[in-house]
Image: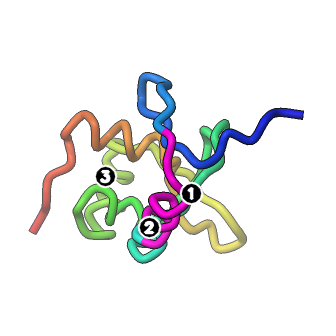
Amino acid sequence: MAENLGPALIDPEGCRHNLSVREYQLLVSFATHAGVRFAPSGEADAVITTGQAADILGVSRRTVTRMLDRGELPGIRLGLNHHRSVRLADVLAFKDRGVASRES
């Protein structure tokens, strides 16, 4: 069984940054308040709503749906109602490219 090394953040280069329990609790509190869903490491295909994507990108939900319609951001349809969702990795990659801009 793998050793529990405690809470940590893993940066894009894969480096581990250990957190105290208090730091972890604060991050979880902030993230929960912001509507961010945590994905365990290895869950590269974590799926979020268009509203959550909008919050991450700093745009409206409608702007995210327009990005999906134009093919600027890949999306998927889930559930019986086929609500649109996006992969968290796709949203973060889009944000890293600096493409997201506010629409009126």
- Sequence-wise, the earlier of marks 3 and 2 is 2
94 or 25, which lies in front?
Answer: 25
**Which mark, by number, is residue 58?**
none
As for residue 24 lying within the magenta part, the answer is yes
Please tell me whether mark 3 or mark 2 is closer to you in this view. Answer: 2
As for residue 53 lying within the magenta part, the answer is no
Residue at 45 percent of width and 43 percent of height: 74
| Magenta-drawn segment | 18-29
- Residue tagged by mark 1? 38
User: What residue type is disc 1 on?
Assistant: Phe
- Residue tagged by mark 3? 67
Residue at 65 percent of width and 47 percent of height: 40
User: What whole-number distance in Å separates the C-alpha atoms at marks 3 and 1?
Assistant: 24 Å
- Residue tagged by mark 2? 26
- Sequence-wise, the earlier of marks 1 and 2 is 2
Residue lying furthest bottom:
33
99 horizontally vs 25: left or right: left
Tell whether label 2 touches label 3 (CB within 8 Å). Answer: no
Please tell me whether mark 3 or mark 1 is closer to you in this view. Answer: 1
Residue at 9 percent of width and 69 percent of height: 104
